[in-house]
Image: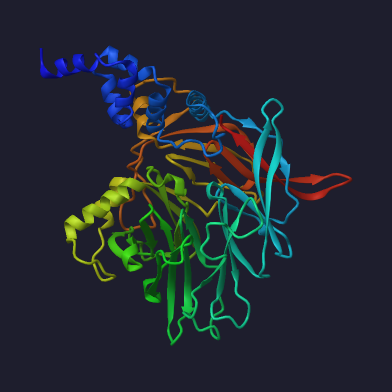
Amino acid sequence: MSHIDQFTLGLLNFPVEILLDIFSYLDAYELVRARKVCNDIRQVIDSSSELLYLIDLKYFNTLPDPLLDSDSTIGTRRKLLQQSETAWQKAEYSKMNHIPVPYPPELIGWSGGILGLPSESHEQITFVQPALSDKHTHAAKWEQRSCKIDSTVLMGYRCSPAQDLVVILSRATSGESHPYDVAFRSLSEDKAHPEAAVAVAKALDNQVDMALSDPFNPKQVLFGDYYGLLSKRAHKAGGGVVDFLQIWNWKSKDAFQCLEVFDVACNVHNFGFLTNDKLLVITPREIMMYSLVESANAIQLTAKFSLPALRDSSELEYVAFNNDIPFYATTHNQLVTISMKIMSTDSAFTTKPSQVTFYVKRDTLLELESTYMSLYGNSKVSQDSPSLPWSTWGPKYTQTFEESSYDSCKHNIFGFRTVGLAGDFVSPKGKAQRRPLCIRDFNPHRVADFKAGKGPKWNQRLIEGETASSSLFLEPLGSALPYLESTTEEKFLSHEMTLEANRVTLLSFEFLRTPEISGTVQKIEVLDFE
């Protein structure tokens, strides 16, 4: 008898309760391996809903549903998880009665799965989140909250429902030494957030020449305890035009806060958080990874990754991260989206737009940081340091999609799942058209089982190995992430959408001509994959 067999027999002499306590220290992959040791150990693990739920979460590469009642038992959570995954695979959903929206489209915006509806006077914002109130009739109701706005010039907002937080960005009043006010308020109560170090922070205080600056909407990102603001082409106090990136911990006056200044020649377009201590800054040529160094109140450049080179006939208009990673997913692998709008000129000198979107896994970027350090050394990285060539990482680790134009109803991501409306919003005849919902699952476990013939296939199809060729670039693009794809039978007339856990929310419209109403009517449609 081998030492392993003797150890296994000795282990099984313990009571089941002690075995379950021992197994609770294993991660999901270790539990899967332990189940293969012998039937007795498999039976012990299978007797625990907690351990099986941990395995399911890892297999489906998902997080506990933030919309789910926190009092639900583990058994209930596991059952609902399996039901929702089946619903996604079958492209089946329950549809709520639609909710009318009596606001003009230009005032509406999504953040953190919540729809913000500023009043036309910008004196307050009403935040609404559709909630299912009756699973039998699918009647819908609003979960509604409101926040007053002290400034008359609203510039944007970010929500974090899990933290009961809304951050409101507005233009400072004339005569102040800073261009922006950043208010940290409670979502549930119309008052300052109780954990905020200051109710209203002064962004870029004494950093810009207020006589020359004409602030426009900056890019803002909220990620857990951190809030970041990118202000482009600002007139620096003392002279010069620069791009400012300011990041601070909004919970403490003495905690991390930094201000990074970029030369406008660097042409910073966008930024986003990757983890609690990593962020990405993107330019037309490359992605730069930074680490947050709290001890020095600074961010430190640690790696650079090149983007594919454009042909001479192509010109980049902007490049951005298309999705913000939810802060509760900080330790969870998921897709990161890089979106590029490109104008190209053909042989007839006709200019046309194209939208190119790259997917890459978050953990891949973190691993590539180590690759960069091993290739170029651990010395301090600067703006002049080389970038990891696109040919080294892009074709091998990304998946590319090319469309004719930007569409906010595409590339909505949660974990390894993406949803979007298939086809173009405008038909060849120039009219808005209804489109089916396209669901793509990049979960490698699901893809592997599908290829091995395990489980039902429903109406999904496997997409892999389709090389993305494009006349816009000099270098080959990525097609390295296989995925499962399905589409719904129902079609939707929508111009905005968001994905949060197992819920797709669409901002739709319809054209009515009745004795009472004539024109376009907006509505919220909610699809629950449960």
Total numbered labels placed on residues in the image: 0
Seen at 29% across and 26% down, the residue is 22
Query: Quick check: can you spot residue 60?
Result: yes
Q: Residue 354, percent across and down?
A: 48, 56
- Say which quadrant the C terminus sits in: top right
- Say which quadrant the N terminus sits in: top left
Q: Residue 149, percent across and down?
A: 67, 64
Q: Nearer the viewer, residue 195 or 321?
A: 195
Q: Nearer the viewer, residue 174 or 317?
A: 174
Q: Describe the colour scheme in one phrase.
A: rainbow
Query: Quick check: can you spot residue 286?
Result: no
Does 204 appear above or below 116?
below
Is residue 421 shown left or right of residue 230?
right
Is residue 440 shown left or right of residue 27?
right
Is residue 83 shown left or right of residue 238?
right
Seen at 56% across and 57% down, the residue is 194
Seen at 34% across and 50% down, the residue is 477
Q: Residue 49, percent across and down?
A: 43, 22
- Quarter where residue 3 is shown: top left
Is residue 309 shown left or right of residue 422?
left
Residue most toward the right?
515
Does 33 appear above or below 406?
above
Q: Residue 97, percent across and down?
A: 71, 35
Seen at 76% across and 51% down, the residue is 102
Q: Nearer the viewer, residue 276 or 353?
A: 276
Does 342 appear above or below 525?
below
